[in-house]
Image (cartoon, grey):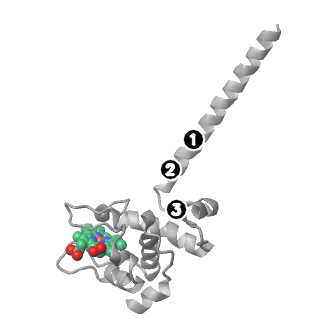
C-alpha cells in the first residue's frame, strides 16, 4: 500500500515535470519566433549579463543601443561580414572582429558606414540608415565578439558626420 502510494506520487511528480518542461519549451519557441520578427524583446537583466564587463557597467540607454544594434547588424551587415564578425573571404569582406578600423576612432568607422568604400562591395548606408541606426550598429560592432572598445556612439555624433 505504502509502496504504491509513493509510486503514484512519483508518477505525479514526473507528470508535473513533463508539463513544466513542455511549458518552458513552448515559451522558448515563442521567444525565438518573436525574436526573428520586428519587435525584439529587450530584457534588461539578460542584456547586463551579456554586455557588462569588469569595470564597465552600461546604462540602460546604452544597453538598448547594443540590443538594437545587434538586430540591425544581422539585417544589414552579417550577409557579408558574418554573424560572428569573422567576415567572408570569398566576398572579400574582412573580419570586423579585431579590425583596427572597427576598434579605432569612432568617427572614421561612422564615416565608412555612411559612405561605404567606392570600388569595393562595401555599400554606403547613408541613404538606408538613420543617424540613430548608424549609432546603434557602430556601438554594437565596437563591442561585439570581444572587440570590447567599451564606449557608445550617440546619434548626434553621426549627425555631425553625415
Ligand atoms: C555586400 C557586402 C557588404 C555588406 C552588406 C557590408 N559590407 Fe562592410 N565591407 C565589405 C567589403 C567587401 C569590405 C572590404 C572593402 C575593401 O576592400 O577595403 C568591407 C569593409 C568594411 C569595413 C572595414 C574593415 C577593415 O578592417 O578593413 C567595415 C568596418 C565594414 N565593412 C563595416 C560594415 C558594416 C557595419 C556593415 C553594415 C552596416 C557592412 N560593412 C555591410 C562588404 C560588405
- Frontmost of labels 2 and 3 is 2
Q: Callout 1: helix, strand or loop?
A: helix
Query: Residue 39, how many percent across, how many down?
Result: 52, 62
N-terminal label among 2 and 3: 2
* Residue 126 shows in this picture: no
Q: Callout 3: helix, strand or loop?
A: loop
The yes-or-no answer for disc 2 within 8 Å of ligand 1 is: no
The circle drawn on residue 39 is 3
* Residue 80 shows in this picture: yes
Residue farthest toward the left in the current orientation of the protein: 119
Residue farthest toward the top in the current orientation of the protein: 1
In which quadrant will I find the N terminus? top right
In which quadrant will I find the C terminus? bottom left
Residue indicated by mark 1: 26
At horizontal 27% and vertical 68% (from top left) the residue drawn is 94
Residue indicated by mark 2: 32
- Residue 50 vs 55, above or below: the answer is above
In the visual, does 125 lie left or right of 147?
left
Q: Are marks 2 and 1 in contact (CB under 8 Å)?
A: no
Q: Nearer the viewer, residue 136 or 129?
A: 136
Query: Residue 119, how many percent across, how many down?
Result: 17, 78
Q: Nearer the viewer, residue 12 or 141?
A: 141
Label 3 CA crowd tier, 10 Å (few <14, some 14–19, many 20+): few
Cα separation between marks 2 and 3: 12 Å
- Residue 21 vs 74, above or below: the answer is above
Amino acid at each position: 500500500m505504502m509502496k504504491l502510494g509513493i509510486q503514484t506520487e512519483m508518477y505525479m511528480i514526473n507528470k508535473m515535470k513533463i508539463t513544466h518542461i513542455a511549458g518552458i519549451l513552448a515559451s522558448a519557441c515563442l521567444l525565438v519566433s518573436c525574436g526573428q520578427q520586428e519587435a525584439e524583446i529587450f530584457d534588461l537583466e539578460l542584456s547586463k549579463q551579456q554586455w557588462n564587463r569588469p569595470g564597465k557597467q552600461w546604462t540602460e540607454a546604452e544597453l538598448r543601443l547594443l540590443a538594437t544594434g545587434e538586430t540591425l547588424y544581422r539585417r544589414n551587415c552579417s550577409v557579408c561580414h558574418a554573424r560572428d564578425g569573422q567576415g567572408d573571404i570569398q566576398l572579400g569582406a574582412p573580419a570586423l572582429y579585431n579590425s583596427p578600423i572597427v576598434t579605432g576612432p569612432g568617427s572614421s568607422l561612422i564615416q565608412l558606414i555612411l559612405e561605404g568604400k567606392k570600388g569595393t562591395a562595401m555599400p554606403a548606408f547613408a541613404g538606408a540608415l538613420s543617424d540613430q541606426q548608424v549609432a546603434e550598429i557602430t556601438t554594437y560592432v565596437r563591442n561585439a565578439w570581444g572587440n570590447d572598445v567599451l564606449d557608445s556612439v550617440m546619434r548626434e555624433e553621426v549627425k555631425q558626420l553625415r
